[in-house]
Image (cartoon, grey):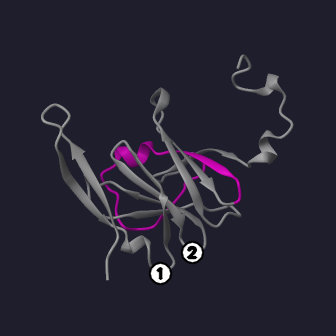
Amino acid sequence: STEPFALVWRWDRGGDGTATLQSALSLSAISSGLFRHDPTTLRVADGLVLLGGSSGTNPCVFAAKPAVRDGWLPVEIRNTRARSVTCLAASDGGGRRLLAVGMNDGTVRVASYDAAVRTNRIGTDSSHLSEGDGGGLLRTVCRIRGIMDVDGLDDADCLWPDE
């Protein structure tokens, strides 16, 4: 049988443009038992490799930091009706490291991933998406309930009213 991997490459930008393999992250731990990942959600941001999926009971973001260790940390998203993560988008605009987590019920959580970038202690113990100012690798900044939060908005309510 074959085992799935996520390969992380380092590109030589100043030299001849060759790539070297930095890390090979096994996906078997997040592809078996209760854990499931969606390979279409793969994102790389600030030295982190992120995948969306499910822990079996909750939506989950799997985080890896190849420069620290070759393993995944499942970060569960609680207090939601969703069952899985369907898309991820990362941005470091304006100096804030933000991750938009789209879920199968149409909701979106926006989380700061700054703590995950700053720590070298990404282990294999399960974590959860922190609410408010609590600890955790990902900290919720806001929740968007899909159409419920944007239906009926007037143009004057938009963040960029001139567009």
Q: Residue furthest left?
A: 15
Q: What residue is rendered at 24% in x and 57% in y?
A: 23
Picture coordinates of residue 69, whole percent (x, y): 26, 60
Left or right position of 103 against 47: right
Q: Residue furthest top?
A: 162
Residue 17, relative to residue 62: is it above or below?
Answer: above
Secondary structure beneath dot 2 equals: loop
Quadrant where the C terminus sits is top right
Picture coordinates of residue 127, whole percent (x, y): 48, 63
Residue that carries the numbered disc 1 in the rendered image = 33
Picture coordinates of residue 51, whole percent (x, y): 46, 58
Quadrant where the N terminus sits is bottom left
Q: What residue is rendered at 43% in x and 42% in y?
A: 114
Circle 2 residues within 10 Å: few <14, some 14–19, many ≥20: some
Residue 15, relative to residue 143: is it above or below?
Answer: above
Please identify the quarter of the rendering in which residue 79 is found.
bottom right
Residue that carries the numbered disc 2 in the rendered image = 56
Picture coordinates of residue 105, whole percent (x, y): 71, 59
Secondary structure beneath dot 1 equals: loop
Please identify the quarter of the rendering in which residue 77 is found.
bottom right
Q: What residue is rendered at 37% in x and 45% in y?
A: 117
The magenta span reads 105-132
Q: Earlier in the sequence, mark 2 or mark 1?
A: 1
Spatial separation of the CA atoms under disc 2 and disc 1: 8 Å
Left or right position of 153 against 85: right
Q: What residue is rendered at 32% in x and 54% in y?
A: 65
* Residue 70 in view (yes/no): no
Q: Is 22 within the magenta? A: no
Q: Is 111 within the magenta? A: yes
Left or right position of 155 against 11: right
Residue 163, relative to residue 11: is it above or below?
Answer: above
